[in-house]
Image (spheres, rainbow, N blue to C red):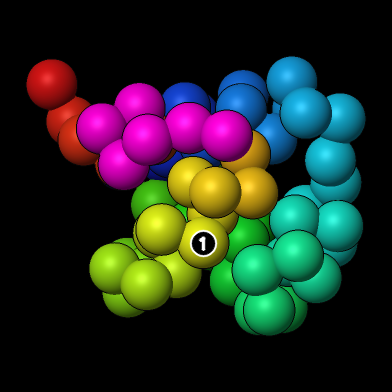
Amino acid sequence: MKNLKMKMARVEKDLSQDELARIVGVSRQTIGLIELGKYNPSLSLCVAICRALGRTLDDLFWEG
């Protein structure tokens, strides 16, 4: 399942996939795969993404 919530939060912060990847210490491809729903990030990576985007785990990663 695509992670459109994460993509929208990234776009709202005016960050490219590459910029977000550099902030959290992964490759741009990793960010792209997470947004496409083809990669399940570790909890620590989820937390780093949330901090970078100013969102909670529930905001970005909870399906509900």
Residue 29 point in image, percent of width and height: 68, 71
Q: Quick check: can you spot residue 37?
A: yes
The amino acid pointed to by label 1 is Ala
> Is residue 17 within the magenta segment?
no
Horizontal placement of 18 versus 39: left or right?
right
Q: For residue 53, which quarter of the picture?
A: top right
- For image coordinates 29% across by 68% down, the residue present is 43
Helix, strand, or loop for circle 1?
helix
Residue 35 higher or lower than 21, as above or below: above
> Is residue 58 within the magenta segment?
yes
Horizontal placement of 16 versus 2: left or right?
right
Residue 47 higher or lower than 35, as above or below: below
The residue where tag 1 is placed is: 48
Residue 22 higher or lower than 8, as above or below: below
- Single out the residue that lies furthest toward the left: 64
Closer to us: 15 or 39: 15
Residues shaded magenta: 54-59
Disc 1 residue crowd, few under 14, some 14–19, many 20+, Cα 10 Å: some
Residue 16 point in image, percent of width and height: 85, 46
Closer to us: 33 or 58: 58
Horizontal placement of 58 versus 54: left or right?
left
Closer to us: 32 or 45: 45
